[in-house]
Image: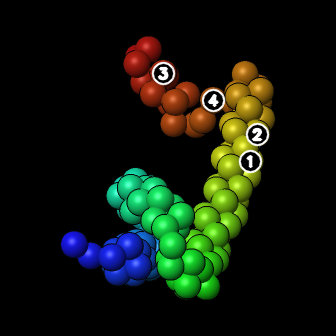
Amino acid sequence: MKSAVETARRLLAAFEHFVEQEGILLRAGHYAQMAQVQRRAAPVIARLTELGREPGVSILGPLVAAVLARRRENLSTLMQRRAALDAARAELAARRQRLQALAPYRRPSAFSRSRRLNAAV
């Protein structure tokens, strides 16, 4: 049976790989796949948390902190992109509302008028 430190090192390497995948997917704009990676990483994080209570595992603290800092950076970037997309969505909704308010006042195009005239002949 492996010691708690060996298991924690192996799980930390897996968690680091998940964080790298998140960063790659974030830069590529594949947000749904990033969410899948986060779901796959959740049990690894839970097990690392459990192992953190074991004696001797605290020596991995600085490594865990470095990986968590990179993950926080990924999540911060994701939140910034989400805020930008929300702002763009709000702008589009405002434009749509302005167009709908002006719709009753639009002039019929020349094409639609000529078609009506030809239909009457």
Q: Which mark is residue 91?
A: 1
- Among the two numbered marks 3 and 2 on one chain, the one whose residue lies closer to the N terminus: 2
- Residue labelled with disc 2: 94
Disc 1 crowd, CA 10 A, few/some/many (<14, 14-19, 20+): few
Q: Are marks 3 and 1 in contact (CB under 8 Å)?
A: no
Q: For residue 116, which numbered disc appears in the image?
A: 3
| Quarter-of-image position of residue 92 | top right
| Rendered residue at 40%/19% (across/down) | 119
Q: Is residue 14 left or right of residue 101?
A: left
Residue at the spot of label 4? 108
Q: Residues within 10 Å of mark 4 (few under 14, many from 20)?
A: few
Give amino acid for label 1: Glu
Q: Is residue 32 above or below residue 98?
A: below
Q: Tag 3, which secondary structure? A: helix
Residue type, mark 2 in image:
Ala
| Residue 62 versus residue 44 in the image, above or below | below
Q: CA distance from mark 1 to mark 4?
A: 27 Å
Residue 37 image offset from top left, x and y in percent: 38, 62
Say whether marks 1 and 2 touch (CB < 8 Å): yes
Q: Secondary structure at mark 1?
A: helix
Q: Quadrant of the N terminus?
A: bottom left
Sequence-wise, the earlier of marks 4 and 3 is 4
**Residue 71 rendering spot, x and y as whole percentages:** 57, 72
Q: Between 89 and 111, which is closer to the camera in this rendering?
A: 89
**x and y percentages locating residue 23 in the rendered image:** 49, 76
Front: mark 3 or 1: 1
Residue beneath the point at 73% across and 52% down: 87
Q: Nearer the viewer, mark 4 or mark 2?
A: 2
Q: Amino acid at mark 4?
A: Pro
